[in-house]
Amino acid sequence: MSGLAGGFRRLGALRLSTLAAAGATATLLAASPPTRRLVMSAAGAAGRAAQFLATGSVRYTAGAYEAAARRWAADGSEAAVAAAALDGKHYVVSGANAGLGLEVARGLAAHGGVVHLLCRSEQRGRAAVEELVVDGAAAAAAGGDVDRGAAEADLRRRVLLHVVDISSLASIDTFAAGYLADGTPLHGLVNNAGVMLDTVIPSADGIESVFATNTLGTFALTERLLPAAVATPGPSVVVVVSSAGMLTADLEVEGVATAATVRDSPPASPGGASRPDSGGTLVAGARQDGSAAYAVTKRQQLALVEAWAATAPPGVAFHACHPADQWEAMRARLGSGGFWFDRAPAAKHLWLGGTGYDEGAPAALVAELRALVDAKGQGV
Ligand SMILES: NC(=O)c1ccc[n+]([C@@H]2O[C@H](COP(=O)([O-])OP(=O)(O)OC[C@H]3O[C@@H](n4cnc5c(N)ncnc54)[C@H](OP(=O)(O)O)[C@@H]3O)[C@@H](O)[C@H]2O)c1
């Protein structure tokens, strides 16, 4: 299903083995106060990774999903999702040409929504539209209540492609300006586009691409489209497809812009991992710990949801989720600012994870990102 699924599984295993080794080595050397601090930190991180693996091996499995699905069938939530009527409502889904984004778009279209697919490749985006239209029409016709040609014509009006690179502030700005100028309502925004990269690749703005896509792109797209959601009569919802992988990461706030800025020179030693390099900056083409970079951005996504929920305009709810919960989060049954898994609010931190942060940290992250966007000349 997914290009990210393998990386997600790697996240726990890799981090645990690396950190456990670091923890053991540091323990042997523990003599001076700085080394003791290192031991504490390595042991804490190793414990966090171990907890994540233990939790994941129980909760994030096919068996756990099947058990949850049986629960949803019994408690009626599956029937409620199946009966959802989204006729004429507008939904924007980023990264909609593959994986989970494509499936969310398929579901929204099947329930009558107008779906705006944001894809960075026109070719892959067109293929996705075609798949949704042709398969959707076949499914509707098979249901017996509609002619296949009519269903196809209807879907062509409702499944709309926009070529948008979520890692590019200018690309987001162009799309959002057009969307707002058209006066299109916004009932739901699904920030789904995401990447996990083991190589430092600069975005069009010279920002490391995992951060540029997952954190900055989510921030800029949401803030730019918020006026459309506010202007839409009735409730609107913003869903951020984060990841339980964020449970392994601390919230990085201060200096995130500097830390994510990529230096353009070639790496001094290709193959040498660096995030960041010894000079405190990232070097284009260098290797990085993609799973660590990913987890940090997924933690930042949750913090963004918390910050937005705290200042939410009336009528707009914000939710983060581990995949599978986009649908439920969109029904916005429970408040705003939460993290969802298996159709229920889930813990934002591991029990002994040590990843908690100050109440003001999410707002501070928003301020950092706003400054970064301003510095790039794309004020939101
Ligand atoms: N799959 C999992 O196990 C898992 C677990 C936890 C969280 N998640 C989260 O769920 C979301 C979707 O994951 P997935 O497994 O469906 O991933 P996927 O199969 O790799 O699909 C990612 C989608 O995002 C698009 N995308 C990436 N960068 C983009 C950009 N700069 N601009 C526009 N679109 C971009 C991709 O487009 P291209 O085809 O052009 O690359 C693709 O359509 C991600 O946010 C991920 O972090 C997934």
Image (tube, rainbow, N blue to C red):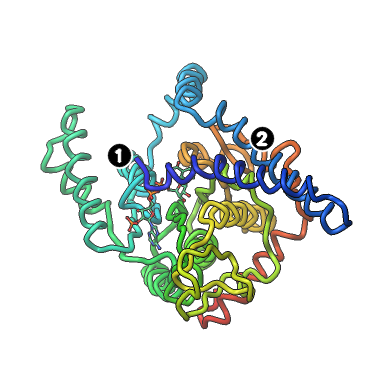
Q: Residue at x 42, y 24 (%)?
A: 79
Which of the marked residues, 2 or 1, is nearer the chain's N terminus?
A: 2
Q: Secondary structure at mark 1?
A: helix
Find out whether the residues at labels 2 and 1 contact each other: C-beta distance under 8 Å: no
Q: Could you tell me residue 327's position as x and y percent?
A: 46, 39
- Residue farthest front in this picture: 28
Q: Secondary structure at mark 2?
A: helix
* Alpha carbons under labels 2 and 1: distance apart: 39 Å
Indicate the quadrant containing the N terminus: top left, top right, bottom left or bottom right. Answer: top left
Q: Amino acid at mark 1?
A: Ala
Q: Nearer the viewer, residue 80 or 304?
A: 304
Residue at numbered disc 2: 51
Q: Amino acid at mark 2?
A: Gln
Left or right of 29, for residue 17: left
For residue 349, which quarter of the picture? Answer: top right
Above or below, 310 against 342 in this view is below
Report crowding for label 2: few under 14, some 14 to 19, many 20 or more residues within 10 A (C-alpha).
many
Q: Nearer the viewer, residue 21 or 136?
A: 21
Q: Could you tell me residue 247's position as x and y percent?
A: 64, 44
| Number of residue marks | 2
Left or right of 149, for residue 130: right
Is the CB of the residue bearing disc 1 within 8 angstroms of ligand 1?
no
Q: Could you tell me residue 50's position as x and y percent?
A: 65, 36
Residue at numbered disc 1: 110
Residue 361: tell me if it is visible: yes
Q: Could you tell me residue 125's position as x and y percent?
A: 26, 57
Q: Residue at x 54, y 78 (%)?
A: 379
